[in-house]
Amino acid sequence: MSIPESLNKEHLHLHEVLKRAVKEEGALGEAARALMDVLHPHFEKEQEIALPPLGMLTLSDDVPKGDIEGVIALTDRFRQELPRMLEEHVAITERLEALSREARKVEKAEYSDFAESLRHHAKIEEEVMYPASLLVGSYLRLWRSGKKS
Ligand SMILES: [Fe+2]
Ligand SMILES: [Fe+2]
């Protein structure tokens, strides 16, 4: 069960930029560290439970392959965890505002652009990735029950 490469790369890239921002001095660095405190555990949780089910998506085959039971169990955990993860998005967005403000003050466009990218990333997760991941779990359940009957 593996996370689609495009999503993995996006997380890695966002994380790399924030790691640079964390080393900045003054209020900008502080805002970046405050963001990292909430973003890092959030990303880890996504890598563990929210995104791996998306590795089951395919354009070529209706018959799922791989660890069906494992993915169903994962999407159950994700469904339970979802309200907290949405709350984390709110906390992340608030801290992003602060980072963006500080970046503009010292004219570091790299970090205000990063803030915009991360905001967009969270929105795509809420509108597309998270629902798609849950849908994979629902589909696998249906598929499994059809197979048994
Ligand atoms: Fe993410
Ligand atoms: Fe997220």
Image (spheres, rainbow, N blue to C red):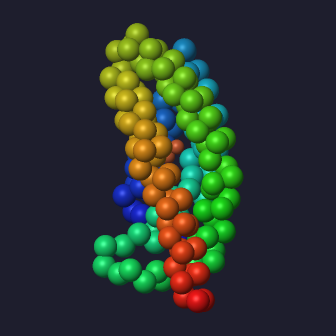
Left or right for 16, reference 138: left
Q: Nearer the viewer, residue 109 or 42?
A: 42
> Residue 13, percent across and down?
41, 46
Q: Quadrant of the C terminus?
A: bottom right
In the rendered picture of this protein, how many numbered marks are placed on residues? 0
Residue 2 visible, this orientation? no
Left or right for 66, reference 116: right
Left or right for 123, reference 29: left
Residue 83 visible, this orientation? yes
Q: Please, is residue 65 above or below residue 79 in the view? A: below
> Residue 18, percent across and down?
48, 35
> Residue 43, percent across and down?
56, 47
Q: Residue at x 48, y 29 (%)?
A: 21
> Residue 16, percent across and down?
46, 43
Q: Nearer the viewer, residue 135 or 94?
A: 135
Query: For residue 27, which quarter of the picture?
Result: top right
Q: Residue at x 38, y 36 (%)?
A: 120
Q: Residue at x 35, y 81 (%)?
A: 61
Q: Residue at x 60, y 89 (%)?
A: 148
Residue extending furthest toward the top: 105
Q: Please, is residue 49 above or below residue 109 in the view? A: below
Q: Please, is residue 94 above or below residue 69 in the view? A: above
Q: Nearer the viewer, residue 19 or 145?
A: 145
